[in-house]
Image: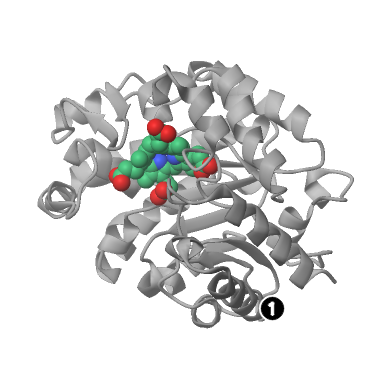
Amino acid sequence: MNTAASPSDSPLVRAARGESVPHTPVWFMRQAGRSLPEYRELRAGTTMMEACRTPDLVTEITLQPVRRHNVDAAIFFSDIVVPLEAVGIDIDIEPGVGPVLDVPFRSREDLDRIPELTADMVPDITESVRRIVMDLGATPLVGFAGAPFTLASYLIEGGPSKNHEHTKSLMHGDPQLWHDLCARLSQIAATFLQVQVDAGASAVQLFDSWAGFLSKADYRQHVLPHSRVALAALADREVPRIHFGVGTGELLPDMAAEETEVIGVDYRVSLAEAIERVGADRPVQGNLDPALLFAPWEVIETQVRRILAEGRAAPGHIFNLGHGVLPDTDPVVLTRVVELIHEVSAR
Ligand code: 1CP
């Protein structure tokens, strides 16, 4: 539902700036993907990485949830490791697993093998974004990148990790190499975001999915400074920046110390508590627990109403889940949630 004349005047962008909105805007992390039968059909026979680099597929997959659910934004269909593959890293996205590397990155020589990302390495991303933006009209496209720590974890562990032990061991055992690696990754993340914005994305989100595994001290010293560089690289583009991490309740005040426009909140902290932690002058995004989409409708409705009410304490609220849509989620429920949010929050 978007009656704005242009994406820059859309409810999502207005909420991110703390301006008045006709209703609370909503989109869902992982709204494109396995919860949609039309996605599964389109993806059949194509690897995830191939799909991410094919503008026809990226455009259609990005638009599918917008058409179906009437959400207030599209999220660019790609993956946080796409820019790593684009600079020549041998990385794959395995079905049911996620990003994997045959040879993990753990030494100075490994780092020297990672070049900087330049826009001419990802012409397909520019093309995909341009096509999507043309089709979306006044609905904004959210571009995204993985934050340096989360990207580093995949590179160093060689795939998804429960404990991030090699990553933390390198962070503390060779802080100089850690910082050099993260500096390179923040350049890659920044350029990936800039390419999307320059092609027409109206907002960006930096995903630091695994930051919740860090102590506050490690986050401050070894991680946040690099995310800051990636976020600051967008400052002159004048699009709202959303900074999101999973399990980051304890880190919210530090995340809010950055100049980003919106703080993403995961589902482990209530939105009311999160607003207290980030300060009442900051727009927030979140935070329905994606697992609750499997509960009876009355439960979902109560939670949605509670989150909308709590969100009113912030100058802007973008409704979202506290993490991505789970693959077995009934898409009909997602559409109903969007309707409910639009109805309850209409001003
Ligand atoms: O076969 C498939 O359908 C592949 C599943 C899939 C999809 C649909 C992966 C593999 N990535 C994606 C797309 C994707 N990834 C999007 C765009 C779609 C949308 O949001 O609607 C986005 C924003 C991401 C970002 C991403 N990839 C993150 C950050 C967000 C998050 O969920 O925390 C992370 C951590 C990844 C890595 C990744 N890629 C894929 C998987 C299964 C994972 C996670 C693996 C793990 O647990 O470590």
Q: What is the quadrant of residue 250 in the picture? A: bottom left
Q: Amino acid at mark 1?
A: Arg
Asked if 332 appears above or below 46 in the picture, the reply is: below
The residue positioned 70% from the left and 65% from the top of the image is 341
In the shown orientation, is residue 138 left or right of residue 38?
Answer: right
The residue positioned 65% from the left and 53% from the top of the image is 335
Residue position for label 1: 312
Q: Is residue 257 visible?
A: no
The residue positioned 48% from the left and 67% from the top of the image is 295
Q: Is residue 334 visible?
A: yes
Asked if 98 appears above or below 127 in the picture, the reply is: below
Residue 197: image location, x then y, percent: 64, 36
Asked if 327 appears above or below 99 in the picture, the reply is: below
Residue 67: image location, x then y, percent: 71, 39
Q: What is the quadrant of residue 21 in the picture? A: bottom right
Disc 1: residue Cβ within 8 A of ligand 1's nearest atom: no
